[in-house]
Image (spheres, helix red, strand yellow):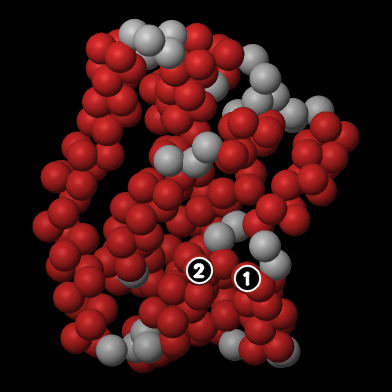
Amino acid sequence: ITWMGNSAFVVILSVLLRLIFAAVSGYAFGLLKFKYSNIIFMLYLSTMFVPYQLSLLPQFIAYRYLGILDTHWALILPNIVDILSVFYMRQFFMTFPRDFIHAAYLEGCGVVRSFFKIAIPLARTPLITLSILSFFMIWDQYYQPLIFLKTPELFTLPLGLHSFQTQFGHEYAKQMALACLAIVPVLAVFLIMQKRFVESIMSSGIKG
């Protein structure tokens, strides 16, 4: 139960912060088009070619310096900035009807208010898609907890499952029960959100 609670806390907070960052960044790169925005975005996009394993050591050193090593924040912070999520939201806002934003400006809305009042409600479909995909990816993360966590009470479910298998290697019934418990949240999210997920994929395909 403790491991599942830790996973739920890390996943929910990571997904929320990732959606906020992706929406703000995608809005800035795709709709506002500030000076050198395309160059900055291409430099940002080029970081995708850097293997993730190369960033683990710098992250470990930085988190130890900041004093957040062996805390859940060491798992949450790397999940906030996701390049593919920003790219996805940028592509959405590049096709966003600018007349809505211009009309909001004429009504006296600024950039921030038009973002929350106009852009976010109309971006509900891609945000739902990102939230589902992000949940699946973050829930199954193993290497980050393995490297950044040492206290068993802070383990997430995948790392806790591996630790349980190491300690109780021959108790297969308990291992299978814990594995089934780990699948339940993923299956529940899929069953609840599958209709919205399919609708978002279909609307994205039609728009493209």
Q: Nearer the viewer, residue 164 or 56?
A: 164
Residue 34, image quadrant: bottom right
Is 160 positioned to the left or the right of 78 in the image? left
Residue type (three-letter) at the residue carrying disc 1? Met
Q: Is residue 79 visible to us here?
A: yes
Is 31 positioned to the left or the right of 64 in the image? left
- Identify the disc placed on residue 84: 2
Q: Residue at x 59, y 39 (%)?
A: 143
Residue type (three-letter) at the residue carrying disc 2? Leu
- Identify the disc placed on residue 48: 1
Residue 59, image quadrant: top right
User: Separation of disc 2 and disc 1 at Cα?
Assistant: 9 Å
Mark 2 and 1 residues: CB-CB less than 8 Å, in contact? yes
**With respect to residue 91, does 174 lie above or below?**
above
Q: Secondary structure at mark 1?
A: helix
**With respect to residue 55, does 66 lie above or below?**
above
